[in-house]
Image (cartoon, rainbow, N blue to C red):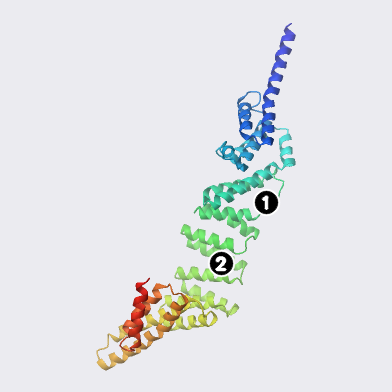
Amino acid sequence: MKKFFVLFIAGSISLGAIAQMGKVTSALSFIDQGLLDKAKEVLDQALVNEKSKNNSKTYEALGKLCQECFKSENPKFKSLYINPLDTAYVAYQKALELDPKGNTSKKFKINGTYLTLGNDFYNKGVLEYQAKDYEAAFKSFETNIKISSSDLYIGVIDSAIYYNTGLVAYNAKMYDKAIPYFQKCVDMKYGGTQPHFLIYQSYIEKGDTATAEGVLKQALDLYPDNQEVILQLLDHYYKSNKVPEAFSYLVTAKAKDPNNYSLYWVEGALYMKLEKWDEAIASLTKSVELKPDLFDLHYNIGVCYYNKAVEMFKKANEIMDVAKYNAAVAEANVIFIKAIPFFEKAYNLKPDEVDALRNLKELYFRLRTVNPDYETKYNEVVKKLEGK
């Protein structure tokens, strides 16, 4: 009798376990039918029952359910889990942990479970990026990389994911997290020079200009003929007041690409920084010859003539002799007049540009006694500025 009783108890335990695992089977059936709320109802019971809560199949079902909730268009199903994909990933990890024999991992490979999960995280990241939730997008893309790097991932990891992960981190101003992903792109030679520029800018945002400069030099070593890298390096030197270094690179750059208007533009800007107006005018004029329809070039030539004239006018004010003073002022006015056509051209290229009009207003007023036509032009500019 005692032996029979023990066998009966053992049989009851077995039948109880089967009954609870039947809930997992029911959950999977509900998932296939699209009844995700019912699937969660029975699966929640299986997750707390002693007979099924430590079974790998229970967590496989949970992972599958969470993925379906994420992909569902039904708001009711979407709200069944707060972070469905995170829950799915944890569930799959738990399923693997509960199956030391490896049957679950084999099943995941056959079914492409991690491939679909990785794709879901990527799609989630794209939606978060579009919503400008960059921190959330970073987390999703980073999880995609972690899943894609697993032995259970049957696909090939897309190199673009490293760039996208770095980009969302950069947009979230998480520069320390962005840099390693852009560096990964550099190591893979993905994206050409763009990852270098983003690493450079990340260090600039961090206030580390020395490392930023090193990044551009490394990029120039890899892409010695790339004008974008050269121009970025020149811009860096310009902003860092390293004028001699900038001129040194300009010599090499102009020798390689003598018809690149940008190089003469940068050269002119450097001379402007040094207040060498004649040299700046010469460089900017060469740039205009190569690119005649650019507002900034005409505007800056006007600025050079204006600043040169101002210096001449200041020196004239130091002259005590009336005749010599008048002659010096006349010379300064000649240079002021030279500025006018460049500001006029700049205004014609950008009619909404207020600074060009304001400079013209001042010049017309200053020179109205030199040329009566400037009085008329002055009044016209005043009216235009009133409408701005």
Q: Position of residue 224 (x, y in %)?
A: 61, 71
Can residue 102 be seen in this snapshot? no
* Residue type (three-letter) at the residue carrying disc 2: Lys
Q: Nearer the viewer, residue 87 or 97?
A: 87
Residue 311 vertical placement versus 21 (above, below): below
User: Looking at the image, is 330 positioned above or below residue 342?
Assistant: below
- Mark 2 neighbour class, 10 Å CA radius: few under 14, some 14 to 19, many 20 or more: some
| Residue found 55% across the figure and 65% down from its top | 216
Instruction: Give the camera-side residue of 210 and 152.
Output: 152
Quarter holding the C terminus? bottom left
**Dividing the picture into quarters, in which one does residue 20 lie?**
top right
Q: CA distance from mark 1 to mark 2?
A: 30 Å
Mark 1 vs mark 2: which is more N-terminal?
A: 1
Left or right, residue 289 beside residue 68: left
Picture residue at 58% right of the left edge, 63% below the top: 194
> Where on the picture, by quarter, is residue 68?
top right
SS under mark 2: helix
Q: Report the residue marked by disc 2.
A: 217
Q: Quadrant of residue 249?
A: bottom right
Vertical relation: 119 (above or below) 244: above
Residue pictured at 65% horizontal, 43% vertical: 117
| Residue 221 shown left or right of residue 297 in the figure | right
Q: Which residue is mark 1?
A: 157
Amino acid bearing label 1 = Ile
Name the front one of labels 1 and 2. Answer: 1
Estimate the x, y position of residue 107 in percent, counting from the top left. 73, 38
Nearer-the-camera pick, 157 or 27: 27
The 10 Å Cα crowd at callout 1, few under 14, some 14 to 19, many 20 or more, is some
Residue 215 located left or right of residue 159: left
**Residue 109 visible in this rendered orientation of the protein:** yes
Residue at the limit of the structure toward the top, as seen here: 1
